[in-house]
Image: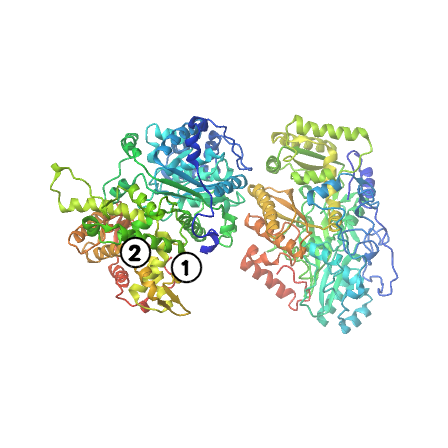
Amino acid sequence: MASNSSGGSDRQRVAQQRLRIITGHLQGREDGDSTIIAAECKAEGSQTYVSREEGKTVPRRRQEIMKWNGWGYSDTKFLFNKKGQAEFTGKRYRLSGMIIPALKEWFEGTFGASMQHKSPAAPVLNSGAVQPPTLNEAFLEELTSTGIPFSHDAEDRVYRAHGHCLHEIFALREGKVGRVPDMVVWPNCHDDVVKIVELACKHDVCLIPYGGGTSVSSGLECPTEETRCIVSVDTSQMNRILWIDEKNLTAHVEAGIVGQDLERLLNESGYCTGHEPDSMEFSSLGGWVATRASGMKKNIYGNIEDLVVHVKMVTPQGVIEKSCRGPRISTGPDIHHFIMGSEGTLGVVTEVTMKIRPMPEYQKYGSVVFPNFEQGVACLREVAKQRCAPASIRLMDNEQFKFGHALKPQVSSMFTSFLDGLKKFYVTKFKGFDPDRLCVATLLFEGGREKVLQHEKQVYDIAAKFGGLAAGEDNGQRGYMLTFVIAYLRDLGMEYYVIGESFETSVPWDRVLDICRNVKARIIGECKNKGVQFQPLSTCRVTQTYDTGACVYFYFAFNYRGLSDPVHVYEQVERAAREEILANGGSLSHHHGVGKLRKEWMRETVSNVGMGMLQSVKDYVDPKNIFGNRNLL
Amino acid sequence: MSNTYRDSCGAGLENEEFVDILEERRRSSDLGHALRTFSPHPYKGAESCSNADLKKAVLESQYLRYIAKEIAAETGSSVEEVREEACGILEEMSQNLQLKCIRLMGFTMSKVLKRLYSGIFVNMEGLNMLQQSIQEHPVILMPNHRSYMDFLIISYIMFTYDIPMPFIAAGIPLAGMKLVGEVLRRSGAFFIRRAIGSDKLYWAVLSEYVRTIVKTGIAPLEFYVEGLRSRTLKSVMPKLGMMQMVMEPFFKGEVYDITLIPISISYDRVLEESLLAHELLGIPKPKESTTALLKASKVLQEYYGSMHVNFGRPMSVRHLCEGKINRCQYNLVPRDLPQKPSAEVQACVSWLANLMVRVQEEGSVMGPWALMACLLLQAPTIVLTEEGLPWQELTDKTLWLRKLALDFGARLNWPSGQGQAPDMDVMSSTVALHGSVVNRKSGRVFLVQVEVPARNRPISPEEEMISTAAVVLMLASYRNMSLHIFVRPALLATALYITKTTQKDELLAFFCFLRDVFSNEFIFIPGNSSQDFEEACFLLKKCGAIHVSEQEVTVSDAGLEVLSFLQALLQPFIDSYQVIFRYLCENEVHVHAEKQFLTAVRNLATELILSGELHTYEALSSDTHKNVLSALQRLDTVTKLRASEQNEYTVNKAAVRRIDDILSGKIPPQMLHTTPEAKL
């Protein structure tokens, strides 16, 4: 997702701009598919701010707009055209329809990949490969009588059987489908969910909540040992803003709404949540709550735990919620913290009251080039110390800096490219920066215009102390754009024998440099040990700053030609990298969650007693393991 | 375990190319060498850091600031005073490496080395690997320490081959030497006090200094894991303090990896041989001083054969510690704060330190002399001094032993001699080289008898014995150079001899007992007792001495010669230990002060030798006495009194007696319930 460029000071203009940019998606059309029984939710709130027809992104049939074996929209992807130039298709993003001239060279140079060696995906989903559903007749019968729409169509089920881990997508590209949910239901509102959960308990059916499907923790994978009927509870149709409380600046929202819709709809009223995880186009509010999500602009708006005022979750024992909306309460351990991070093991989050803010008057991107990563980290640390971090501040290492450059679209104006050349000359030759060591921080400021400019100066002054040079708004903005297109890039790589993934951690400040160096080195070492024939891409960036530490993101990809089981090699390397993270004082996860992918390290992470606490909550809330996705514990 | 670090080519040196680096020096100008362009490829991650920067980084480290505050609070002095003191310690300690000085040293050393040695042989492959490793990770050079000569030889080689100059940990007495101290400091030496004890500030400065060198990778670090120069040419049980400091940056994730380079320096003949022997007999070593050095310069007029410097395969600490250390233990406390190493860390450091010494041993090159010394010592001393050993018998046995040593995987330096009988040539020239220990007259080999000036005669029997003992201990030291090859099979041979059993489990129990008792004497890797036993069985089986089945170990007829040789090899140690055990058991004293203990034991041994009850002069060695004391402490039979100022000990006589009884075979092996490693 791209965002507005700097400029507009007036709120209205900004709102319109954001509207234009964030969306551009297709309208979800009402469908009359035979397998789906549509019904209006009887319990629908009477005073919804926005009615359903008003442009929601996600239709029941995701296949209408989204890929079945890759990231994002069907109409959007990277490809190498006949001239061998990289191109980004579609119309949705700023980069859409553009030629990216340097990408091919970077891609071939970095991975040793070649246009001649393709590894194309299976073109269509073969429904025959999908196991016929195990249906619980009694459940089905009673569900039908409630009028809640459901389906056991093979495509619908496959779409909800995976997140976006490498192994999940890789298998789909090969046309392989494992255990998938036996049916999908689309509750329309909180009461629908209550009914579904009641029926599931009554008939011993396994429920797996499904929000935006962007999990990268194997969280959506169906446990292979599950023999009961598995029902995927797709909350995507619970997507209304039920009310906005302008006096207290809160909004009450159904949990299935995806990030881009939530922001857009609030923007129309002049508000925003400011919660912008990289997956916000597709990930849902309920998913954020269930995984303890973090947004890019948390420095101003906070992470999900700071944003949530009230949550409603339907569990096998009934509905859990607090009785008031007090901004902070001292009533024993916060029950919200049983819900946040529960990863679908306790129930379905149905409605959330969250903080909203008036839309920022002014936004400005920026970037700083540092002579090396060490200086960059030192600068971020200082910014955190002075508590003057902009809405977002991210530091990319040298490899990512080069990657970012490779993604520059073709420039139309001679003058711009001349300027670029000049800038590069200035930085590398005149300032003596080593192009193989320098790194860049991207910045995003938000707020009142005066304040933003003042803030900007403060940050640039600090940067200068660490040898940082301001490197323009363009570089900054491109950095953020990259976030949204990088997932599409993985699909391009997979067409040419390149697989990769990103993973994250959080770590105290004094460990940041060490963890970055050691994990990157470990990845390279493990690849070598595991017989990877080509130098892998092993790179990182610091994406969030806190008072006491930072969030670090690692990107890792390699050319798997010559390997018989690339996914296994990939998983071994990722596992080793996680071990390295933990050995270097990093956390198991900053915001991706545990799922099933990182379960093995939970006990050492939270201690035996901690595990016991979590387990006893699970045992009380869900003794029959109705919410049986087996995440976390 | 032992096979994972052992070179693929077990025996012999044929597969490795050792190059004599003096050859080039004999051909071209030493001055040219000293002034050569020195362009090393340093560690790629190294931050450029001057000596002043290094000191500043140490003094301003959070660790030192914390300790300074703590000490100030404890002692009531001000933080500034403590920091000033720290600054003084650092001044005393710091190296001041300067290339100018290295060139000067290089020039001098070229001259000296050429005079002393026929050749300095260096394995080029190891050197190439080192050159490679140095660029990748911080490197620790870990040579063994047999002679003062070791001290700058590594730097000399590094200089010659364009490898970054190391910082070298040295004992503080060297720093006190006029001129020499400063020259060493400028050649990269940094100086460590001997008895640091509980001096908290000193420990803090030292460990921060060492860690900073490793962390920043500004230079390879060279240190002797044995802690000091071996007085007996036998490996010394490693010291763990320095090892721990060196490893910490890896444990704490401050570096990705650390590369350890084991280096084995082997001498045909050691400069200090006679000095060391006298020291072992309680005649104190001269204080390290420049004048003493000049006085000793007459040793420089003799000839010392050749020297081998074997650079071992680089070893990755990360790889070695895999599964041994949970690095998460450093997650909860800031890494710059003092933290007592956990039991896990201590065990790992100890394991690694012992492993390094074992690898040094395996990399060391022994000449014919080490073998001949083994055989000479097995003849009664009276024979060697009075009638002499027939030359033919010695050479025959030496050739026999050569085969055994090669079977056991020794790296043997057996030059191809010239003439009709090349092997005889080699042995003759070997004996000639060691004229200070033996001489050959009319077909027989005699121990050298010190000429006593006529005016001092007659000499007392004690004096005569001491002078014989000095030569015997010299001989024993050369024998010790080969012990690491034989010690494991020898323990098994001894177990067979004492227990007379064939039961494998009983032998294993007795083997472990011996290994336990003697692990201050010989280097065993902690936790490896079963592997050691298996190795012993394997080697003895290989040379046809025993048959091994599931449950039994039986001696073959052809094996008697091997077994009795091996058993006799250990006998002096057993005898010496037993003398001390008996002293401790029979003495009425309850509290032993270390000093008195050493004197008393020496007197007892002297008495026993003179009366003919004890046959080994090695019982006179203070090294052995100290080892017994440490071993008994380790086995919890001797306890050091905490309050004691002068190292006083109490003895659990029953426990000592039990060890003695087992050692003499009075307790049958079935009664041994020593599970492997129970004590370790």
Q: Looking at the picture, which amino acid does disc 1 mark?
A: Glu
In front of the other: A4 or B329:
B329
Picture coordinates of residue A604 (x, y %)? 55, 56
- For disc 2, the neighbor class at 10 Å (few under 14, some 14 to 19, many from 20) is some
Q: Is residue A21 visible?
A: yes
Q: Residue at x 44, y 26 (%)?
A: B100
Picture coordinates of residue B421 (x, y %)? 34, 48
Query: Would you place residue B499 above or below residue A121 in this image?
Result: below
Residue extending furthest toward the bottom: A138
Q: Looking at the picture, which amino acid does disc 2 mark?
A: Leu
Closer to the chain start, of discs 2 and 1, is: 1
User: Left or right: where does residue B510 sit relative to residue B597?
Assistant: right
In front of the other: A129 or A448:
A129
Task: Give me the disc on residue B32.
Answer: none
Dot 2: element: helix
User: Left or right: where does residue B371 sit relative to residue A461?
Assistant: left
In front of the other: A321 or A542:
A542
For marks 2 and 1, give the CA distance: 18 Å
Picture coordinates of residue B4 (x, y %)? 48, 54
| Disc 2: host chain | B
Residue extending furthest toward the front: B420
Q: Which residue is mark 2?
A: B570
Q: Which residue is mark 1?
A: B535
Picture coordinates of residue A235 (x, y %)? 76, 58
Dot 1: element: helix
In front of the other: A619 or A291:
A291
